[in-house]
Image (cartoon, helix red, strand yellow):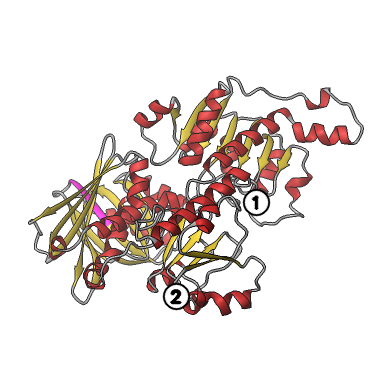
Amino acid sequence: MAFKVLIADPLSDDGIASLKQADKIKVDIGTDWSKEELHERISEYDALLVRSQTQVTRDFIMKAKNLKIIGRAGVGVDNIDLEAATEHGIIVVNAPNGNTNSAAEHTVAMMMALSRKIPQAYLSLKNKLWDRKKYIGTELKNKTLGIIGLGRIGSEVAYRARGQRMNIVAYDPFLTEDQAKKLGIEIGSLEEVLKKADFITIHTPLLKETRHLLNKEAFALMKTGVYIINCARGGIIDEEALYDAIEEKKVAGAALDVFEEEPFFENKLLNLPEVIATPHLGASTVEAQEIVAIDVSEDVIRFKNGDAVRNPVNLPSVTKEVLSEIEPYFHLAEKLGQFLIHLAKEPIEEINLYYSGDVAKTKIEPITRNAVKGLLTRHLGDHVNDVNALYLAEKRGITIHENKTSTTQGFTNLIRVEVSTKSDKRSVAGTLLNGLGPRIVKVDDYSVDVTPKGHLLVIHHTDQPGVIGKMGSLLATKHINIATMQVDRAKVGGNAIMVMTVDRHIEKKALEALEKLEEIHAAIAIDL
């Protein structure tokens, strides 16, 4: 019987050619089917290929009785219910590298068009005006390009900008000095990039921490006459703040491929002559569309032939028996990673995981994946998952070691995650308590007992009388209520730690106020 594949969204004909020619595979094109017809007929198919239009919901998956694999021809999988697919044993694959070159080229094209005012000059010429003085441009040579986010696309932009003889300063939470040196660029903090750059381009995912990353305060740090390019995600730039910065002549111009609301027609930024824009064209090249279609098609063929797929995005397959044994540790490991990443103040170079007690007797690799996923999620967002976490860490030059040890420190099971940076080591350990669930029991060398959920506040301080009272009083002025508190110290009068659960997220200003107290060395807010 033939392996039946449904293509629900338009894909490149050349990209799906290998799928159509494959032995014992039957391909149907359903790009003109209604939602009702898709839901009605999906039970006939073994594989489904989509782009972003078709919404593969839990309800849709429930009706896909024979579906074994879903291919997303592109990077994002936000239109696919991954949890439902995993629950029903359906593997999801995507094409994470297909649009890298396309997006990088579009970024550089937008930067050059912005610097030379090409779109504005063209419109002027169309209106039968020949105004050479009005459209005098700016050369890229010897200018400083600030890159925020140096992943696949950011790195490709850096490579091209070097060809334009630009100076490059980049910020990425995982960028080490050795990596920057190999790329021939300068590494900087976010603030340094904002202050130094003549042109700023963004290449980060849209996360809670990157939403409105370029806001009123960020624009205030920039040079007067800076140029802004965003071909990443709408929402990373506060559009109201950008509008004001252009009106005030702080920003000389902006090139935007993405917006907070799309499609857009009434955005007032488009009324500014200093702004050029395109309708989310970063991945819209013939080559990119062909590559992503080829990638998912070939993964479907591999799957059908019993081979390992190259770009899975949901949980790798393990037997039900093994899964039931290790699954309780997944949540604990991920939360340990999410907690620990807030303590690391420099790019991570090495991750060590130590398993002891009952957990050391299990299959630990899927648990490691969840811990690394937790570490990376803060800066990479939904792009990182259980399957690609180790790959993404490796791409960022992070070395990972798994260790099994007999040292349990009195717990029946214990997971300790340790990260090393250029000048520091930080660690957190956790356990599963019978009937009580996951607990954080160690932060560095301090003993605590913390449930890893909700809004947490970690304070490093000097062990002196009155510190807790001062801290509590200050939080009260900020209307922040303390729910629980754990305290431990290295020695009397020495360094100590407080880990608190509070009722709401703690804003940056409150943390800065805490750190102004003489006895407090650091205050870190962590939302789990």
Q: Quadrant of the N terminus?
A: bottom left
* Residue found at x 44% / y 75%: 66
> In the picture, residue 305 is in which quadrant?
bottom left
Q: Is residue 191 visible?
A: no
The residue where tag 2 is placed is 66
Q: Looking at the picture, which amino acid does disc 1 mark? A: Phe
* Residue found at x 49% / y 56%: 297
- Whether the magenta-drawn stretch holds residue 34 is answered as no
Find the magenta span and give its range: 494-498
Residue 4 in the image: above or below residue 130: below
> In the picture, residue 458 is in which quadrant?
bottom left
Mark 1 burial class by Cα count in 10 Å: few <14, some 14-19, many 20+: many
Nearer the observer, 186 or 294: 294
Q: Looking at the picture, which amino acid does disc 2 mark? A: Asn
The residue where tag 1 is placed is 259
- Report the Cα–Cα distance between label 2 and label 1: 38 Å
**Residue 513 position within the rendered picture, expressed as x and y whole percent measured from the top left:** 42, 49
Locate residue 100 relative to residue 348 in the image: left or right. right
By secondary structure, the bulk of the magenta-drawn segment is best described as strand
